[in-house]
Image (cartoon, grey):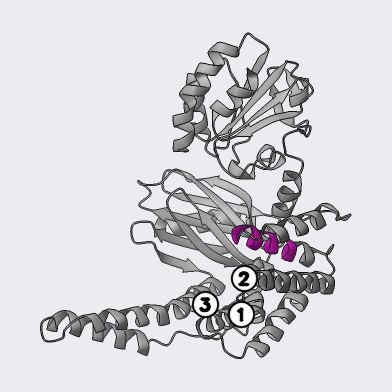
């Protein structure tokens, strides 16, 4: 605790209070995690990395950002995710990684948030314990059944404060979460639910995006309107009219419109509704405004990442073999291998890539290994085996600009470009690329 108090004092001395987001904390029992912590917020309804910090030898760190933001915030290590909420006031904590709980938390906002989160999960926990109890015969399992009953009783008696009036975001977050959860459980009062969720999507402020609930609300809205519709063609037709109505109402080129469009596209893609996915992707391509939603920007970019299209002239952050951009490399063919050191499929594919490299390196083929690692040590350790290759990484994972420019959704992804930088082939395995070289 002395270490934490000292850290808090340093925090004030260095003037972090001038920042809009400022966090100081200590992770206890850090032996099982790496030393880096990434910080994420919801921007446009999707997670956005706003920075990273390196833990000191005591597991402590301080982070500040000028980002003006009120909403959910996540601290991610390679093992755990710590969920917080920020309203631009300082946050101080001590967190035990072994038990995954806060030892100390100095933020009234976050204390109330953690309590509210417990309220949300309390009912689910109690319900599951009741189900478990029903499977046990009290006669043969007296002690265990008694323990279950006692825990159920204890949970049901716990009454954590729900006084969120001082904190508008918490009030919004938990009220909306309750509305969505109740609807998903009961699916009653469909007309009333539809009106509420449509109004939420059309009229609520940025709290909707910053709560991470936009997609949940959109699903609830679609569900309330599709109840009873079973024929696939009718489902698609109804979804089409609902989506058009939503986008017309919120103005498709507005920030909210972009966020709804991106969420709808993801739902259509995951549900394999290809006709609507293609239709609204074309709509996205035709937007004339500045695209603020990063996922939507990537989806739009993906429409030009096809065989026969010219690859973007990506500008390197630092020069690569004295070249400033991809197009400056002049060769008959270029092979771009997007990979990550932690990707098992990438590791399995690399011997085949190496074999092709040996056969084609001096025959007009330039090879690029583009890492989507976000940890410098992992990246540098991997490329030790490839000292003479064109090795490159932004150390930003799938958030890398180059990953977005090439619409990378998984690894390995391999591109073959010709001398004019036209895409000749895209595949997840090198054998497909090899065929195009023959």
Mark closest to the chain's N terminus, 2 or 1: 1
Secondary structure state at the residue bearing disc 3:
helix
Q: Nearer the viewer, residue 27 or 288?
A: 288
Q: Which residues are magenta?
A: 259-271
Image disc number at residue 176 = 1
Q: Residue furthest top?
A: 362
Q: Nearer the viewer, residue 217 or 234?
A: 234
Residue at image mark 3:
112
Residue at image mark 2:
213
Corner quadrant of residue 256: bottom right
Query: Quadrant of the image for the C terminus?
Result: top right
Label 1 Cα neighbours within 10 Å, binned few <14 / some 14-19 / many ≥20: some
Is residue 368 among the parts visible in the rendering? no
Secondary structure state at the residue bearing disc 2:
loop
Residues under numbered marks 2 and 1 in contact, where contact means CB atoms less than 8 Å apart: yes
Query: Quadrant of the image for the N terminus?
Result: bottom left
Q: Relative to residue 35, is residue 96 drawn left or right? A: left
Gap in angstroms between the C-alphas marked 3 and 2: 19 Å
Mark closest to the chain's N terminus, 1 or 3: 3
């Amino acid at each position: 605790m002395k270490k934490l108090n000292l850290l808090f004092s340093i925090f004030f001395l260095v003037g972090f209070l001038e920042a809009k987001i400022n966090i100081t904390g200590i992770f206890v029992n850090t032996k099982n995690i790496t030393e880096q912590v990434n910080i994420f917020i919801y921007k446009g309804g999707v997670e956005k990395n706003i920075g990273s910090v390196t833990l000191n030898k005591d597991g402590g760190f301080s982070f500040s950002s000028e980002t003006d933001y009120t909403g959910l915030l996540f601290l991610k290590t390679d093992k755990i995710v710590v969920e917080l909420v920020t309203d631009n006031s300082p946050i101080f904590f001590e967190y035990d990684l072994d038990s995954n709980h806060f030892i100390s938390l100095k933020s009234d906002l976050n204390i109330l948030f953690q309590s509210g989160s417990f309220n949300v999960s309390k009912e689910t926990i109690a319900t599951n314990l009741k189900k478990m109890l029903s499977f046990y015969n009290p006669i043969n399992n007296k002690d265990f059944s008694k323990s279950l009953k006692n825990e159920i009783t204890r949970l049901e008696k716990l009454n954590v404060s729900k006084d969120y009036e001082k904190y508008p975001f918490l009030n919004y977050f938990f009220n909306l979460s309750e509305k969505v959860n109740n609807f998903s459980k009961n699916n009653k009062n469909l007309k009333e639910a539809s009106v509420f969720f449509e109004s939420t999507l059309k009229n609520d402020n940025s709290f909707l995006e910053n709560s991470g609930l936009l997609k949940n609300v959109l699903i609830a809205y679609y569900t309330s309107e599709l109840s009873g519709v079973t024929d696939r063609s009718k489902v698609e037709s109804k979804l089409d009219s609902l989506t058009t109505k939503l986008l017309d109402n919120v103005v498709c080129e507005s920030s909210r419109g972009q966020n709804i469009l991106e969420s709808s596209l993801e739902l259509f893609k995951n549900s394999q509704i290809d006709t609507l996915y293609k239709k609204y992707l074309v709509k996205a391509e035709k937007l004339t405004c500045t695209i603020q939603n990063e996922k939507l920007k990537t989806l739009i970019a993906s429409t030009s990442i096809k065989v026969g299209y010219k690859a973007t002239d990506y500008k390197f952050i630092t020069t690569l073999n004295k070249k400033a951009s991809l197009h400056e490399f002049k060769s008959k063919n270029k092979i771009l291998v997007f990979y990550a050191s932690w990707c098992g499929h990438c590791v399995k594919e690399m011997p085949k890539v190496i074999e092709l490299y040996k056969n084609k390196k001096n025959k007009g083929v330039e090879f690029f290994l583009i890492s989507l690692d976000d940890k410098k040590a992992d990246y540098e350790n991997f490329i030790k085996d490839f000292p003479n290759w064109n090795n490159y990484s932004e150390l930003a994972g799938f958030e890398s600009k180059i990953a977005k420019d090439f619409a990378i959704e998984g690894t390995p992804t391999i591109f073959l470009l010709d001398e004019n930088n036209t895409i000749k082939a895209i595949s997840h395995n090198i054998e497909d690329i090899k065929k195009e070289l023959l």
